[in-house]
Amino acid sequence: MTEQTEKSTRDVGVILQESEDNRPIIEAIEQDNPNCSIGHTPGLVRITAPGQITIQQETVEEKLGREWETHEFQMSIVSYFGNIQEWDDDEIVIAWDH
């Protein structure tokens, strides 16, 4: 495997507080990123995926049943690994810079 191939499949992830308020956000991330893995530890949820995680405002709103602004995501995050490639009004993308 070449170094470039390794970088393109390196996992990125986000760790969120486990709470009733965050459950719909976690479900939305899982729906929009079918290749993600979700791990639970006391009080935390770790979501990882190869290459990229996308958080879509529309999907989160569907799960929450209300309007949701992407800046609200800051209240849920404990940590993340990867780079924030995009953070605008309709989506957040976490991926590694190449």
Image (cartoon, grey):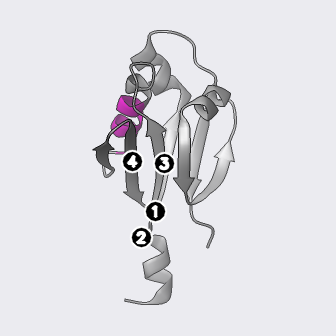
* Rendering quarter of residue 76: top right
| Whether residue 14 is situated above or below residue 65 in the rendered picture | below
Say few, some or many: other residues with alpha carbon within 10 Å of mark 4 (under 14 / 14 to 19 / 20 or more). many
Residue 96 location (% of width, % of height): 57, 65
Q: Which amino acid does label 1 sit on?
A: Gly
2 or 1: tag closer to the N-terminus: 2
Residue placed furthest toward the top: 66
Q: Residue furthest bottom?
A: 2
Depth check, mark 2 against mark 4: the one in front is 4
Q: Dot 2 corresponds to which residue?
A: 9
Q: Tell whether label 1 touches label 2 (CB within 8 Å).
A: yes
Task: Give the residues drawn in magenta, as a range.
Answer: 26-33
Gap between marks 2 and 4, in whole Å? 15 Å
Q: State the residue at coordinates (51%, 38%).
A: 55
> Tag 2: residue type?
Thr
Cα distance between the residues tagged 3 and 1: 13 Å
Q: Residue at x 60, y 29 (%)?
A: 75
Q: Calculate the distance from the C-alpha at mark 4 to the C-alpha at mark 3.
A: 5 Å
Is 93 positioned to the left or the right of 86 in the image? left
Q: Position of residue 17 (x, y in %)?
A: 46, 34
Q: Mark 3 points at which residue?
A: 14
Q: Quadrant of the C terminus?
A: bottom right
* Chief secondary structure of the magenta portion: helix
Where is residue 26, by image quadrant?
A: top left
29 in the magenta segment: yes
Look at the numbered disc 1 and give the secondary structure of its residue.
loop
Q: Which residue lies furthest to the front in this view?
A: 42
Residue that label 1 marks: 51
Label 2 vs 3, first from the N-terminus: 2
Q: Nearer the viewer, residue 40 or 64?
A: 40
